[in-house]
Image: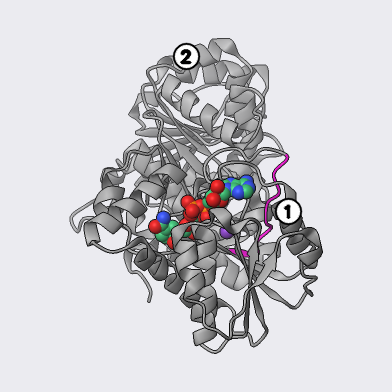
Amino acid sequence: MKILSAAQTRQADACTIQEEGISSTDLMERAAKAFTGWFENKFQSGTEVHVFCGPGNNGGDGLAVSRLLHERGHRVQPYLVGDLSKASDDFNANLKRLPQELQPIRVQDAAAIPALSKSAFIVDALFGTGLNRPVTGLYAQVINSLNSSGATIASVDIPSGLYTDSQTPEEGAIIRAHCTATFELPKLAFLLPQHEQFVGEWHVVPIGLSEEFILGAPTNFFCTTQEDIQQLLKPRRKFSHKGMYGHALLLCGGYGKMGAAVLAARACLRSGVGLLTVQVPQAGYSILQTAVPEAMTLTDKNRRHLSELPQGVEKYDVIGVGPGIGTERVTKTAIGQLLATSSHPLVIDADAINLIAASEKLKAQLYKKKLIFTPHPKEFERLVGKVKNDYDRLQHLREFCMEYKCYVALKGSHTAIGTPEGKVYFNTTGNPGMATGGTGDVLTGIITALVGQQYTLEEACRLGVYVHGLAADLALQTVGEIAMTASDVIDHLPRAFLHLTQPMP
Ligand SMILES: NC(=O)C1=CN([C@@H]2O[C@H](COP(=O)(O)OP(=O)(O)OC[C@H]3O[C@@H](n4cnc5c(N)ncnc54)[C@H](O)[C@@H]3O)[C@@H](O)[C@H]2O)[C@@H](O)CC1
Ligand SMILES: [K+]
């Protein structure tokens, strides 16, 4: 699913109106109906709904929503905030359509801002994607007052004051919504951790914008949906054998961190790899053989750390490296050898990233390789330097991937996958239960398995990240967020793959 800019969204609206031969008020009515349906589904409440409307089309939506909720038996109070002399045509059209008994309250100065209680419901329709400067003055006072009321806030399209696709200036007030129903496509701002406090839970409500326009609209940003993933999955063939699903090598584990190798190996095997060899330092031999009997185990000559590549390294289809390996000098040498000698696709995680980030010599060896990096934000900063904010991080992600022609799965609540073409795919599965040690090792194992099965690097990243989050979402039902461990994520991989191959109702 594409993510469009605010400007493209406006064009999509205009194109839809032209294509369908409808008026912009008709499209607004559609949007208001979609929001009202979502709102009623979400909040079956008898309490009064306070709808705050700004002067633009977002405010127009608010007025139409007020009318529709009123028609459906809700107690509604609309508020018209600020200077209405420049109100949009569709705002005015919907103001006229308010029934007699629905008298809006004008809020033209701070004294008129109502004091709402915690139990109130607020619909925030002050500003949408047409916001073109930070919110200050009376509008900011209204926003601050609504935020501090403690009432439940549902935003129309986007929390008012939040810029859709660029950094909101510091001085601008922003609504802290509990939930947001956004029209047709997700907005880039929703996917960034720095906006967590504003966006809350968000849902996309379709309003039938021009498919043709959306299809043709250029963008670098995408959200991965279940449909996208199901189209990527390759069924296993009846007459297939283990040789057809790849032989993966994992270079993982170190003294005190053999668990990382166990987790990566178990996840790799649960993700369909044909054969798996794991090389661990000598101290890990019994651990691996006992904990993961399906994997073949090789030992490094070093007792505690990765220090060499296995003999015949060419025979593997993919190599996953990093979890638990540490940053010893001998390990750095081994990573150097790996980058210098291997033409395999490499999945590079954890301390392998840290070692590369700290060495210009290793970095210089990254060119012309088939590479997937799976850093968390701190590891990513070690690679690219300090970032200023989430938009800056995205820019660095795109530039790094384009420079090294590699893939990066930048882990987070919406893991962002960068590609050599400068595209970014945001993931839509996963939950805070995954914020615990070992889940990254699991992801390395999954992606390594998928590359081994001849998925392209892009497919392996998108599918791997999605199924990793989906397994955690399925684990929620039995273990919940607090108790979730990385092993729970592995244990739910079978259900996650089943869910994707045989979608449940
Ligand atoms: N264009 C369309 O056909 C549709 C638009 N829709 C709604 O319309 C919204 C976009 O509407 P608009 O483009 O009218 O924009 P907005 O309603 O977001 O706001 C634009 C108005 O606010 C003013 N403004 C912008 N920033 C301000 C600030 N910081 N302080 C004070 N005033 C400020 C502008 O001068 C303009 O009058 C969408 O988010 C969506 O809710 C939906 O009804 C779907 C159809
Ligand atoms: K809004």
Q: Amino acid at mark 2?
A: Gln
Q: Is disc 1 surrounded by few (<14), some (14 to 19) or many (20+) residues within 10 Å? A: some
Q: Quadrant of the C terminus?
A: bottom left
Answer yes or no: is residue 492 visible.
no
- Mark 2 or 1: in front is 1
What residue does disc 2 label? 365
Q: Which residues are magenta?
A: 171-179
Q: Quadrant of residue 154?
A: bottom right
For badge 1, the amino acid type reads: Leu
Tell whether 9 sits left or right of 377. Answer: left
Query: SS class of the residue under badge 1?
Result: helix
Pointers 2 and 1 in contact (C-beta within 8 Å): no
The secondary structure that most of the magenta stretch takes on is loop
| Residue named by callout 1 | 138
- Direction front: furthest residue: 85
Report x, y in % for residue 68.
49, 79
